[in-house]
Image: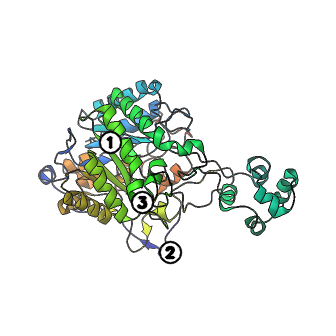
Amino acid sequence: MWRPPQRIRHQPARGRIPAQDEAKASLLFSPVKIGNLTLAQRTWVPAMVPWRATEDGFVTQNVIDWYERFARGQPGAIVVEATGIRDIPSGPLLRIGHDRFIPGLRKLVETVRAASEGRTRLLIQTIDFLAIRRRPQPAKFFQRFLKITDAHRRALGTSNDGDIRARLAAMNDDELAQVLDARELESLRFGYRERVTDMHLDHIRALPAVLPALFADAAARASQAGFDGVELHYAHAYTMASFLSATNTRGDGYGGARENRVRLPLDVFAAVRERVGADYPIGCRYLAEECVAGGSGLDDAVFYGVEFARAGMDFISTSRGGKFDDARQPNVGTAAYPYTGPSGYECMPQHISDARGPFGRNVAPTAAIRAAIRAAGKTTPVVCTGGIHNFEMAENLLASGACDIVGAARQSLADPDWYRKIAQGRGNEVRTCEYTNYCEGLDQKHKQVTCKLWDHDGLDDARVSRTSDGKRRATAPEWKG
């Protein structure tokens, strides 16, 4: 991952620890409604991809164990990882693109409900993504993948395609830059990646016609499986976020001006709402800032947030960055990872940071979005995430009006019981995330995600469930609370 030039070490802290009575009376542990659904408290475990599904997208026992462990901490809500809406191969990511996935997802819902004693609401995040390929060996790229065009023939003065491929393979980078166009160079150096602006491709041009029904079908399956609601994934490097991006220059009415860029996300929401009905909670996660050159900024996000609220979304959750645009060049044989550049750092900053530090970088933008939604006369609850790791931080965010619900991913991974511990006046027992991004490093390698604060505890016990490599425990140790 990219690192800022400043190397300031920031120390996460437990903050002020409330007594049980104070915690009970706090905003954090007060109820909140998202649509017709009531959360018992304003604590939220955002979607995290743990790489525990089967290669064809089915729920496994490891997936169930993962969410069951969070559920025993009894947060107000858990959002299940980004789950693919298409019935296509996507590796060990959960899928919801066909009815055959419903039984496994239903078992997951039932497990969370039982483990939380009915106190935690379970939502599922639905996602669409475009094709991305691994960075190729140069010889293979020129022999198999590069489409020879008249531009190459003119540049090299020959119509012999075999000769062109051989000559290109022998060129250095500077020479290649004189012959290949920007997208060809990117495919060579980073791997091929589709964009929503690739209007020469029929399936890309058809996205506005295809995606609303796909998302609606996925939401209907989520409802059948028993999920309490759906979070539409409009963030980071994926299809819907790309439509919202200022880099979206489509000329078909779905790109260019931000009024056009928000059109498909609103169409998707409308189709989902029509399919599942007015009473089923639907919200989205989107970017408060893209954090890339030429990308959308806070003014765009404020506009989108108001539009989503006016459309009737039941909640809005914000994130930031995490784009392919500035990702680090991958090694040959691996794909680009959208959290390796400066925008990826904004999404998951670590404890060695710049002067702004890693804690609460998304608070001010989220507060601005929420303020605009309130000014528009809407009471849509807003979820803020990003480096939140103690009661004092969370309570201050709620009291200041920055947000209505507090999300914590890495802190919840470090200690799935941290909410329960605080609620019982035992905040001194919380295992505080150190923000080293050990977990992010595992995710980048598509290894099963764990936390370094606990994944080697108790490995001498044969009953401890381990990750697929056999080297780490798969879930956090139990708390005897």
**Side (left or right) of 174 relative to 251:** right
Residue 348 seen in the figure: no
Where residue 163 sits, quadrant-wise, is: bottom right
**Side (left or right) of 267 relative to 153:** left
Q: Residue at x 47, y 75 (%)?
A: 6
Count of labels in the image: 3
Report crowding for label 3: few under 14, some 14 to 19, many 20 or more residues within 10 A (C-alpha).
some
Percent from the top left, x then y, of residue 223? Answer: 33, 30
Percent from the top left, x then y, of residue 78? Answer: 32, 42
Q: Residue at x 58, y 42 (%)?
A: 202
Under mark 3, the amino acid is Ala
Dot 2 and dot 3 residues touching (CB under 8 Å): no
SS under mark 3: loop
Q: Residue at x 36, y 64 (%)?
A: 298
* Mark closer to the chain start, 2 or 3: 2
SS under mark 2: loop
Q: Which residue is mark 1?
A: 78
Number of the label disc, if any, that sits on residue 257: 3
Under mark 2, the amino acid is Pro
* Mark closer to the chain start, 3 or 1: 1
Tell us which disc is closer to us: 2 or 3. 3
Quadrant of the drawing holding the C terminus:
top left
Q: Which residue is mark 2?
A: 5
Q: Give the camera-side residue of 333 and 422.
A: 333
Query: In whole angstroms, how far apart are the C-alphas of marks 3 and 1?
Result: 35 Å
Under mark 1, the amino acid is Ile
Percent from the top left, x then y, of residue 411? Answer: 35, 53
Query: In whole angstroms, how far apart are the C-alphas of marks 2 and 3?
Result: 34 Å
Percent from the top left, x then y, of residue 441? Answer: 52, 54
Residue 403 seen in the figure: yes
